[in-house]
Image: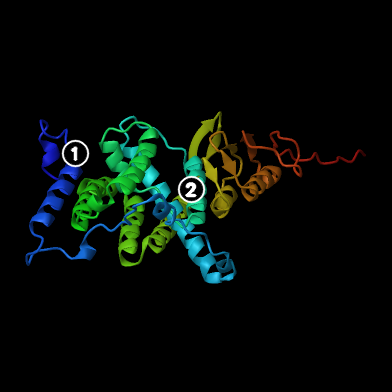
Amino acid sequence: MIYWPRIKKIAVIPAPLLVVVVGTTLAAAFAGTGFALLDKQYVQIPVVGSTTEFFGLFKSPNFDGIKDKEVWIVAATIAIVASLETLLSLEAVDKIDPIKRVSPTNRELIAQGAGNLVSGFLGGLPMTAVIVRSSANVGAGARTKMSAIFHGFLLLVCLLAIPSLLNKIPLSCLAAILLTVGYKLARVSLFKHIWHKGLDQFIPFVVTIVAVILTDLLKGVGIGMLVGVFYILRTNMRNPYFYTIGRNGGKEAITIKLAEEVSFLNKAAIQVTLTNLPAGTDVIIDGSNSRYIDPDVLEIIHNYRHNAYTKGIVVQLKDIKERYDVPPLKDLVYKPEPIAQTVN
């Protein structure tokens, strides 16, 4: 698995296939000796001898379990774990795809859900996208979805044609293949790459790995997501806008350019900034880069524009939508009312 692919002249033969052949041959050679493997250390799939036995593998679901809350809990857990594993696998495969395509995640989850429904009605186990087989598929030169269909067809043919031969494969061979592929996906250079991205990327990454190892996939990913959300909120609160100071004639001009996403978490920071702006300045609040501005933040901005004239501040709003309860968009300039004069 490690050295065979480095020899170009013989690398045309896949290393995993060689591992299976050599491992099966060694297991047969040591049969009957003190080094022989136990039955449970081999692949175990049902041997089908007739059409009746083949269709006998299918089981009808027991709908009485639908009343059991434990069934619903297990079903929800499997659905979440399978969906997360599929999305993680898709992201990993997209990164190693030599053509650099982007997989349609919605279509994949819909297909997976439909497939699991059919599998459940036939007595089968739920399925999910698996990074090891997917990466092996990419490594073998696959380019289209037909490779996955062909893979399933080959599994069915092997199940029907050579089940006895497959049961002679030691599980240790498959473990060696999985470990090697897994190491390639989590190599040391990957950790270095995430480290150079900063602690806000590295800490959630490491926490997720440690949590998965100490608990399970669902809990580990959930813990990692919570840590990731914390850093997203932390970053979002720190960078709600960009603040620049310039001159407009003889007056000081301040430009506040809002970030791409301005959520309710930024409300306090923006309110404090607007409140502390010096009197008698020109202020431009620019939302041209913003895809979303929380309604609470919009209310603060419009209220400030409406009341800023009391400090002699001219406020201009750029690409910020109107609210129904504020005056039409225009500059508001503080103009003292004239003092009434008494004529003698």
Q: Is residue 41 left or right of residue 239?
A: left
The residue tagged 1 is 14
Which quadrant, please, contains the C terminus?
top right
Residue 277 point in image, percent of width and height: 57, 46
Residue 311 point in image, percent of width and height: 65, 45
Residue 79 point in image, percent of width and height: 48, 56
- Check disc 1 and report its element: helix, strand or loop: loop
The answer, for residue 325, to whether it is visible in the render is yes
**Amino acid of disc 2:** Gly
The residue tagged 2 is 115
Q: Give the total number of marks visible in the rendering.
A: 2
Which quadrant, please, contains the N terminus?
top left
**Amino acid of disc 1:** Pro
- The residue furthest right is 344
Decide which of tag 2 and tag 1 comes sooner along the chain.
Answer: 1
Q: Is residue 5 left or right of residue 343?
A: left
Q: Residues within 10 Å of mark 1 (few under 14, many from 20)?
A: some
Measure how far apart labels 2 and 1 are at the Cα level.
Answer: 30 Å
Q: Nearer the viewer, residue 233 or 65?
A: 65
